[in-house]
Amino acid sequence: MAIRPSWNDRFGPYLLSLLILGLFLFVWEAATRSPRFDAKGKTEDQLTTMEFNGDVVKDAAGHYIWNPDKVKGIPGPMKVFEKARTELGEAFVKKGTNDHGIGFLVWYTIKRFMSGFLAGSIVAILLGVLIGLSKPLFIAFNPFIQVLKPISPLAWMPLLLYSVKDPFWTAILVVFMASLWPTVANTAFGVNSIRKDYLHVAALLEMSYLRRLFTVVLPAAAPAIIAGLRISFGSALVAVVPAEMLLGELGAGYLTWIEWNNLDISGVIFAILVVGFVGYALDYAFGRLAALFTYTEV
Amino acid sequence: MHHNSLNDPFDAAQPIVDASHSHSHQLATNSPLADAQRDFEARQTPSFRGMEHFHEAGHACSGQDCNHASHAASRPAASTDNLLTRVVENAVMRAIFPNDMERRAFLSVVGRGTAAAVLGSMFDFGTARSMAADPVKNIEKKDLSVGFIPITCATPIIMAEPMGFYSKHGLNVKVRKAAGWAVVRDWAVNKEVDAAHMLSPMPLALTLGAGSPAVPFFMPAIENINGQAITLALKHKNVKGPKDMKGFRFCVPFTYSMHNYLLRYYLAEGGLHPDKDVQIRVVPPPEMVANLKADNVDGYLAPDPFNQRAVYENVGFLFKLTKELWEGHPCCAFAISKEFTDKNPNTFKALFRSIVDATHFAADPKNRKDIAKAISPTNYLNQPQIVLEQVLTGRYADGLGGIQNVPDRINFDPFPWHSMAMWILSQMKRWKHVEGDFDYQKVAEQVYLAAECDKVMAELGYKTRGATSKKHIIMGREFDPAKVADYAKSFPISNL
């Protein structure tokens, strides 16, 4: 008889997740709560100045209270929630060249990310196969790849901007650079370490070069390539947001920047959360896709 | 002024004068319409001869005796535009309601707002107005993008979009927000935008190739004068002057900025060497406020709204307005590449007019509240309206518990005096921000289109200057543009 997992085993971890979230929100709210405004000890002049500066406002009863629209320090979760509600409410509204709804911004980021990542990956796999198939080439190229691999993709940005002279393409190229090296290195390594038996059999069958590539080499190296793509994926995702922030190109990173420009911390927190969710969604989709190409060797 | 007494056609309570029915003697008297007609006629004088003049900028009129376009010099400034609007609206309303009683009845039923909106949707008042103002013909490129940095200095460039100054002159301009000065410069150089908001020293630096490849740029108009401030952290409440600032960490928005040169001048006048006795960092303005909050810096000389923003955030106070250092100093500017003006002379003319027009509108204190409202949304400045209002109206909290009233805290004046360029060049020289020798006057005349600006102002019926250079007083010391080379070498504290 199969043992049915207990209720605790099945839902316990999720409950724990919720509990952690709840606790976090509670601590956050408690830590950012400001005491009620106390007008005692303040002269009429001081109060007028404070009101003029937007620190306090008069409530319906004519008493001074803290201005609810002006957040001092880190805003609480309620403020962020409010901000998220207004932003999501206008997710697909364009209010001019510089103010597109969050839905558009996320879409721009995904587009930018996907085009850079796809182009980078295709180039990287081709390059990797080329290098990996020949031992001398592999040894000759390896030092360059090892040096280029650890360079932060953002470090390329000034050089790219200067040579390409176009922020739109620069942003895509930054993503391209970010997704290039890990895949090149992994593909080369994977192709290079294919079991020699496979290649011998392919040679015996007198397969054409292309056929050999698609039926033997790539499938055999697939796990290594996928692993490389995964690393590239992560680093490209990390690169796209700061590239948008620095270049001022519309996207999720742009949102972070304009909210920061307004010193609107709830906006910044909201933008960070958006970046997190977008990254999670993309990573999840990629994981599902990768699962189709992975297998365990028998 | 009797100009404004031309009746509002959207007011049900007022009759509107009907020119076609008026007796001829009315035109001869001082009736508003007679004035309007005279204005129209004056406007028809063809004074813009096209682009050929741009390349001989200033050569024909260097010094004090430049006097072309003086025919318009005595005309009143801002009211002509409102008047023109009124005249056009009057004409349209008269055409729709030949019987004035019908117009009044109509307005009392639907209300003026609705009436104006409905008519505006049927009939483009903006177009009608620009048609009245001898419009620029054969515009090569109507859809333009203009880069800007989200600060109040860029007010005319920004508000010209929502308030319709670009469309009034036949252009469809979208303003595009840039992340920093280097970005806006690169956009302009790489033709990512057609024109840009820059700091007034930037077109000079670009033309000279300081800090970037040399690309010839024009600066047709200044945006704002005054409007900056030295903001200090609240803990420095007792600071009296430069003497107390030794070792301070300051921020400025860009190397080639009036902010940098004014701060350096101020410190040096007080005996401090800005490169030895204090630290001056280049920091994007919003980060200045955050850094002030985090106690990473002691103060900054920055564009608004970030001075007022420090007060709003309760982290700093306004130590000195820059107008106290140099009354009427230039700050930000409208810049465009020579290449663009060569290729699109008519577009440039229309753009130039839009900017000069918008800048004059912004100069009128009574428009400032509306402007604050128009430019505060996310698409433009993305700042609290209360902060922008305090900056633009000059009634502001100083951060020390007082409320100040300085109406010209920021002001707007498009005229790019060559002498201003020469002062900036002298300071670039002084601090070794530019290498080698150059002819101050020549560079100034090449980049700052003062004579052309005068012409555009004349065409639009604004007061002209009739000269391209003048003497300036900076912290009590006179700057004479005729002696600029000696002036640059005259400072005891300098990097020369």
Image: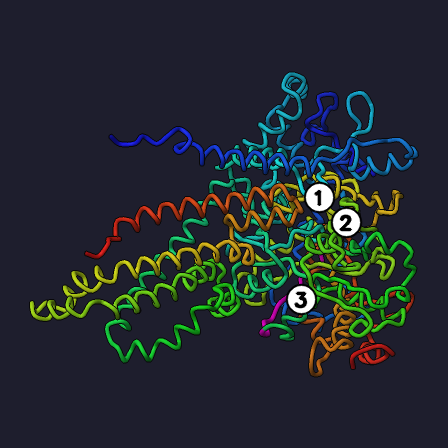
For label 3, the residue is B202
- Specify the amino acid type for callout 2: Ala
Question: Do dots 2 and 1 share one subunit?
Answer: no
**Residue at the extreme front:** A1
Viewer-nearest of discs 2 and 3: 2
Residue at 65% from the left image edge and 26% from the top image edge: B113
Number of dots carrying numbers = 3
Q: CA distance from mark 2 to mark 3?
A: 26 Å
- Mark closer to the chain start, 2 or 3: 3
Q: Residues within 10 Å of mark 1 (few under 14, many from 20)?
A: few
Q: CA distance from mark 1 to mark 3?
A: 35 Å
Q: Is residue A91 left or right of residue B83?
A: left
Q: Is residue A125 left or right of residue A49?
A: left
Q: In the rendered structure, are the residues bearing label 2 and label 1 in contact, judged by CB atoms less than 8 Å apart?
A: no
Residue A25 drawn at (x, y percent): 60, 36
Viewer-nearest of discs 2 and 1: 1
- Specify the amino acid type for callout 1: Gly
State which chain disc 3 sits on: B
Magenta region, residue range: B213-223
Quarter that holds the C terminus of chain A: bottom left
Any mark on residue A73, and which? 1
Q: In the rendered structure, are the residues bearing label 2 and label 3 in contact, judged by CB atoms less than 8 Å apart?
A: no
Q: Is residue A297 visible?
A: yes
- Specify the amino acid type for callout 3: Met
| Secondary-structure class at tag 1 | loop
Task: Please tell me in which quadrant of the rendered image residue B81 appears.
Answer: top right
Whether residue A264 is situated above or below residue B94 in the rendered picture? below
For label 2, the residue is B310
